[in-house]
Amino acid sequence: MSNEKTIKSALISVFSKDGLEPIVKKLNEQGVTIYSTGGTEKFINDLGINVVPVEDVTSYPSILGGRVKTLHPKVFGGILNRQNHDGDVAELAEYNIPQIDVVIVDLYPFEKTVASGASNQDIIEKIDIGGISLIRAAAKNYADVICVSSVDDYAEFLELISVNNGAISEEDRKRFATKAFNVSSHYDSAIFNYFNANNDDTVLKISETKGKVLRYGENPHQKGFFYGNFDDLFTKLHGKELSYNNLLDVDAAVNLMLEFKNDAPTFAILKHNNACGLAQRDTLHQAYVDALAGDPVSAFGGVLISNSEIDVATAEEIHKLFCEVVIAPSFSAEALEILKGKKNRILLQIHDVEMPNTNVRSCLNGILVQDRNNITDKAEDLNTVTNIAPTDAQIEDLLFASKICKHTKSNTIVLAKNKQLCASGTGQTSRVDALEQAIHKAGSFNFDLNGAVMASDAFFPFPDCVEIADKAGIKAVIQPGGSIKDQLSIDYCNDNEIAMVMTGTRHFKH
């Protein structure tokens, strides 16, 4: 290892003491002089280990209720001096500044304090000043100093000094500096986003500190990465590593099933981010069977999701199908063993958590950000615009279809009957194409569309869609409305005894 430096002095000032004790003991064992402040100084003293108070170095006490402890030239001079620079070495001697070889800092928990719902004043007090400054200084001077910037790195640092008897290579010092600048940049982003919660400044700062390399992206010749804390959302119970495409499908599945949270047993099967089967029934087993009937061909290799615990009967049916991922809030013990029968099948237990309130995607040479589509069409939102009103059963089917439509690629048409997805037209360049695709698909899987309902993600610019739907047996339609030619579609429905409701809310999904 190149350019090793042996630690002779350490400055320790941390919020979290978890895991610190063995580090302090090892440094003491190696004859390292330890400097510290406040609660950390007391912690070290209580271990029976000698510690030099920073106040003894600076000749200043901790002031302003602890807001100022380490901000002093004798501290930062000890960190920032260049050990191979004659002028720096001379100034350290002239001003009686101690050399500092390692800085160990764990910042005030700003994000946790915000998440706890604390008061603004409590949050402001958790903006670390001295700690963040120490981190930046030590990381900048990685040529001579190693910076341990988080409790997450305590164990690795302890191993380094234990194996090498306190000698640290330049490669390791630089690696820890990289970690440190990750900590500092993430911390500052979190603070800015708190202050800019209302987006008064149209500035985007995204910082994800959890990341993993995927096998590849959408295709094997593309690199792929996932940044985020997957474990916050799921417990992975079984199976191979999730791929880029798996993750996109899982995202689509979770967002769709949130529409049916706390409803009767509901099961969905997705392929390429769109539902190819979805049904709601009295039992989950029947919901799965009827979801699969929606398109048993596309279901092959799909992502499956349930809004309730997967039981043995359902697991036995699922096990007959080759599928990539199965997601549920829970699995019975027997069901889990059955589904583990395929070694690569990914089984995910989803936690009860909120999804982000914003959608982010790359666009051109920048980024598009929008609010999450939080509107779900409800019975009270429906405006009946035809002479004939939908029945209660039709209203349930219309709302069921609308939920699916909202989560299907535009242009889309969804056909449903008795809370079962009959077919959908997905991602078509015209609404007529989407409808004809849906009708053809429903017919190919032997669905009787007489009495079915139709949902559209956007308005009908012409009456052609309702005319085609009528000839297929559709008897009720839900759409946002808003076309200058809405009346033409309404007139056709009135002439042919079709109920139509408008919601006033478009649900494009691109």
Image: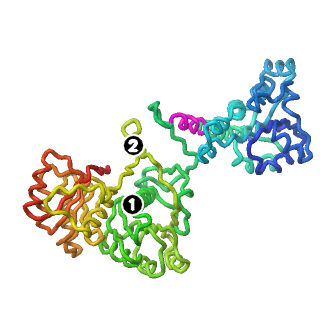
Q: Where is residue 377 in the image (x, y as percent from the top left)?
A: 32, 56
- Residue 417, image quadrant: bottom left
Which of discs 1 and 2 lies nearer the camera? The answer is 1
> What residue range appears in magenta?
186-196
Q: Which amino acid does label 2 sit on?
A: Gln
| In the image: residue 273, left or right of residue 31 | left
Which residue is drawn at the image coordinates 18% and 63% (left, top)? 389
| In the image: residue 244, left or right of residue 154 | left
Which residue is drawn at the image coordinates 73% and 39% (left, top)? 105
Q: Which amino acid does label 1 sit on?
A: Glu
Q: How many labels does the image show?
A: 2
Whether residue 422 appears in this view of the structure is no
State yes or no: discs 1 and 2 in contact (Cβ < 8 Å): no
Which type of secondary structure does the marked residue at label 1 adopt?
Answer: helix
Q: Is residue 103 above or below residue 500?
A: above
Q: Nearer the viewer, residue 348 or 469?
A: 469
Please tell me how crowded label 2 is: few (under 14), some (14-19), or many (20+) other residues with Cα within 10 Å. few
Q: In this view, does 178 lie above or below 424?
A: above
Please tell me how crowded label 1 is: few (under 14), some (14-19), or many (20+) other residues with Cα within 10 Å. some
- Residue 454, image quadrant: bottom left
- Cα–Cα span, label 1 and label 2: 19 Å
Q: Position of residue 288 (x, y in %)?
A: 38, 75
Q: Nearer the viewer, residue 43 or 153?
A: 43
Residue farthest toward the left in the current orientation of the protein: 495
Q: Nearer the viewer, residue 189 or 297?
A: 189
Q: Is residue 332 above or below residue 389?
A: below
Q: Where is residue 137 in the image (x, y as percent from the top left)?
A: 70, 30
Q: Kindly identify which residue carries mark 1.
A: 259
- Residue 384, image quadrant: bottom left
The disc placed on residue 370 is: 2
Mark 1 and mark 2 lie on one chain; the one further toward the N terminus is 1
Q: Is residue 195 magenta?
A: yes
